[in-house]
Amino acid sequence: MKALVYVMPKAGVLDPQGKAIGQALEGLGFAGVQDVRAGKVIELDLAETDPAAARAAAEAMARRLLANTVIESFRVEIA
């Protein structure tokens, strides 16, 4: 079973990578981009067959390793 973990900086946390992407987009002529936040997507292929158990496992992995919960938030999707 596949689990997708989306990790993003929390609101109010500086995001220098997002800022750099926003400036680069502006420099390339893409007008109207007001803000950019950069995060990451982690795809997990789990042996678990129960969706609830797969979600619980992926959330535990995100809390313990995949996201720095002090400055990042995450959400899990089961595919």
Image (cartoon, helix red, strand yellow):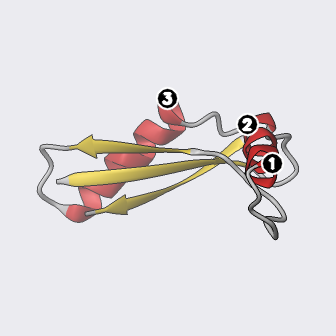
Above or below, 72 relative to 78: above
Badge 3 marks a residue whose secondary structure is helix
Badge 1 marks a residue whose secondary structure is helix
- The tag earlier along the polypeptide, 3 or 2, is 2
Q: Quadrant of the C terminus?
A: bottom left
In the current view of this chain or complex, which residue is farthest to the bottom?
Answer: 32
Above or below, 8 relative to 35: above
* Mark 2–mark 1 distance (CA, rounded to whole Å): 15 Å
Image location of residue 62, percent across then percent down: 48, 40
63 sits to left or right of 23: left
- The tag earlier along the polypeptide, 2 or 1, is 2
Q: Quadrant of the N terminus?
A: bottom left
> Which kind of residue does numbered mark 2 sit on?
Gln
Image location of residue 77, percent across then percent down: 38, 62
Which residue in the protein does label 1 denote?
27
Viewer-proximal residue, 15 or 57? 15
- The tag earlier along the polypeptide, 3 or 1, is 1
Which residue in the protein does label 2 denote?
17
Packing grade of label 1 (10 A; few <14, some 14-19, many >=20) is few
In the current view of this chain or complex, which residue is farthest to the front?
Answer: 29
* Mark 3–mark 1 distance (CA, rounded to whole Å): 35 Å
Q: What number is the disc on residue 65?
A: 3
Whether label 2 touches label 1, CB < 8 Å: no
Determine the residue positioned at 30% across, 52% down.
3
